[in-house]
Image (spheres, helix red, strand yellow):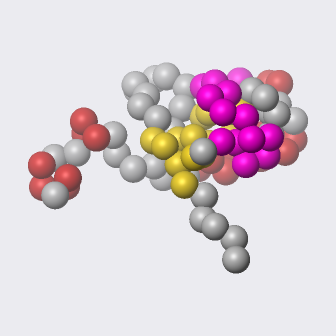
Amino acid sequence: MAQEQTFWPVEWKEGEPDLLVCMSCLSEAYRRKVPIPDCPTCHGVSTYEAFTLEAICDWGTEELIAKARKAHAEVSPPRQADMTVEQAE
């Protein structure tokens, strides 16, 4: 039975790139999160860099661009600072 992938949330500021690409294999892209404990493709640790979707489309492979587009379309949870007390409880 396959285990469900778990992630660490990544903080970002409005206007900053929020797609994280594994720089070891250039095969994985996630939005505002990174997998725990490592990259599922190459097992690299702490190898993620942030990019915009437009930047990834400029240099990425078709596979990476597809993953980035899928990740970009995902709805991410609100930042902790954006949550009200009622939402956090």
Q: Is residue 53 visible?
A: no
Query: Image point 80% across, 24% down: which residue?
Result: 58
Query: Image point 16% across, 46% down: which residue?
Result: 84
Query: Image point 20% across, 52% down: which residue?
Result: 88
Q: Name the outermost residue toward the bottom.
A: 1
Q: Is residue 46 magenta?
A: yes
Q: Is residue 6 above or below residue 44?
A: below
Please indicate whether residue 35 sits to the left or right of residue 25 in the image.
left
Q: Is residue 11 above or below residue 68?
A: above
Q: Nearer the viewer, residue 43 or 57?
A: 43
Q: Nearer the viewer, residue 35 or 32?
A: 35
Image quadrant occupied by the C terminus: bottom left
Where residue 2 sits: x, y (%)? 69, 71
Please indicate whether residue 50 sits to the left or right of residue 56 in the image.
left
Q: Name the outermost residue toward the left.
A: 85
Please indicate whether residue 32 sits to the left or right of residue 39 in the image.
left
Q: Is residue 68 magenta?
A: no
Counting the numbered discs, the total is 0
Where residue 17 sits: x, y (%)? 55, 26
Q: Is residue 2 above or below residue 50?
A: below
Where residue 46 sits: x, y (%)? 62, 29
Query: Image point 51% across, 38% down: which residue?
Result: 32
Q: Is residue 88 visible?
A: yes
Region in magenta: 38-57
Q: Quadrant of residue 19?
A: top right
Where residue 10 sits: x, y (%)? 46, 35
Image quadrant occupied by the N terminus: bottom right
